[in-house]
Structures are given as C-alpha cells and as structure tokens.
Image (cartoon, helix red, strand yellow):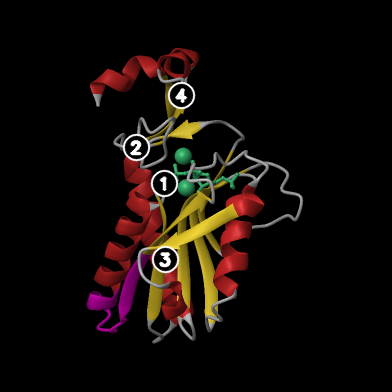
Amino acid sequence: PQHYYGDLEYVLIPHGIIVDRTERLAKDIMQDIGDNDIVVLCVLKGGYKFCADLVEHIKNLSRNSERFISMKVDFVRLKSYHGVLLLSNDQSMQDMQIMGADDLSKLTGKNVLIVEDIVGTGRTMKVLLNNIEKYKPKMIKVASLLVKRTSRPDGYRPDYYGFEIPDLFVVGYALDYNEHFRDLNHICVINDHGKAKYRV
Ligand code: PRP
Ligand code: MN
Ligand code: MG
C-alpha cells in the first residue's frame, strides 16, 4: 500500500520471488512426505500468509500429480502466562504457553509440518518444538520462509526455508513492526522514519 512508501528503506524480496520460492518449497516438501497425511501447523500471526500460500501450492501440486494428500491445518500462538505477548527478544520465553486452535493432543502420531515466517534467534522455534514433541507426533518438520543470518547458539536451522537474509528488521508478507505492515506484499526493510512512526 502506498502509505507505507515513506516508511521503507528498500524491497528485500519482491512478492513474485516469494511466490516462486514457495512453490519450489512445496515441491520439496511433497517429495519428502510421500503419500503421508500431514497436519500443517501455522504459527500465528506472522506465519499466516506463507502458510496459506504453501498449502495452496501443495494442494495444486497434488492435484496436478494426482496424488491425494490429506492435509489438516491447525494454528498455534505463543503467549506468556501473564497474558502478554512476548517479543521475540524477550528472555522469559521459558514461561511461554503454546495455545493451539485445536487440542494439541490431536498431533499425537501425526506428521506435523510447522510453518513459520522467520527464524531469528531461534527461541520461538525451540520453545515450540519442545512443546510439540510432548504430544509425540510421528514426525515434525519445520518450514520457515526466512532464516536470519545470525549466530544461533545451537546453530538451529529449519528443515525447509525460503531465503537466508541479513540480520535486518524486515516487514511485509505478514511480518510486522508493532502490528503494522502485515498487509504489505513484498518483504521490505523498514527505515528510521517508519520505526519512529510506528514505535509504541
Ligand atoms: C516473530 C516471528 C517468529 C519469531 C522469530 O513472531 O513471526 O515467530 O518472532 O523470532 P525468534 O527466532 O527470535 O524467536 P512475533 O513474536 O513477533 O509474533 P507475531 O508472529 O505474532 O508477529
Ligand atoms: Mn511469529
Ligand atoms: Mg511480530
């Protein structure tokens, strides 16, 4: 949207490139899952666009190849016990509560594909994986559109990712800065003006 133009430094990944890469990832994922049924677990809020597009690609690919893949979609949100959504740089992530749209015990014995927008410090994914593992799924894979090129202490990398990006604050395609910019199609780098404007 035009009203964001003055708030952005530059476009890092144009929407068309995201679409192409997502289709490629869908192919890779399809190849690996074979004929297994999957539960797609979208991490809200940032994961909603990538997840929706990835599911769409998997569906189209399975239709074209006449391979029927049964897909269920569920959602999780990470929240602190204090009712305050934690920022990803918050140290108190151990206190986090995983809220599923459905009962997460439904993941037991299932092939779970976690879908995220970005892995930064990796803390969110660590907490989530630890929690999901408790439900004893048959398999857990993680697909993240972006991975930040930062030093993650444990060197964590998702099973599938779209792009490795520099350690910059990016917005758009569902990634937010204080809840703004999720409706931007491209992935962009926010500028100082934008940061000041939407600071809380
Ligand atoms: C962002 C992003 C990832 C997480 C990555 O979510 O969507 O979930 O941070 O950061 P990390 O690897 O350093 O833990 P955020 O907490 O901003 O919530 P949101 O998705 O609702 O915007
Ligand atoms: Mn998120
Ligand atoms: Mg966010």
Calculate the distance from the C-alpha at mark 4 to the C-alpha at mark 1.
16 Å
Secondary element under disc 3, as helix, strand or loop, is strand
User: Is disc 2 surrounded by few (<14), some (14 to 19) or many (20+) residues within 10 Å?
Assistant: many
Residue highlighted by disc 1 = 46
From the image, state whether disc 4 or disc 1 is nearer to you: 1
Residue highlighted by disc 2 = 182
Q: Nearer the viewer, residue 87 or 120?
A: 87
Whether the residue under disc 3 has CB within 8 Å of ligand 1: no
Q: Residue at x 57, y 53 (%)?
A: 96
Which mark sits nearer the N-terminus, 3 or 1? 3
Q: Which residues are magenta?
A: 62-74
Magenta-drawn stretch contains 139: no
Calculate the distance from the C-alpha at mark 3 to the C-alpha at mark 4.
28 Å
Whether the residue under disc 1 has CB within 8 Å of ligand 1: yes
User: Is disc 1 surrounded by few (<14), some (14 to 19) or many (20+) residues within 10 Å?
Assistant: many
* Identity, as a three-letter code, of the amino acid under mark 2: Arg
Q: In the drawing, what numbered circle is on residue 190?
A: 4
> Left or right: 59 with respect to 50?
left
* Identity, as a three-letter code, of the amino acid under mark 1: Gly
Residue highlighted by disc 3 = 41
Which mark sits nearer the N-terminus, 4 or 1? 1
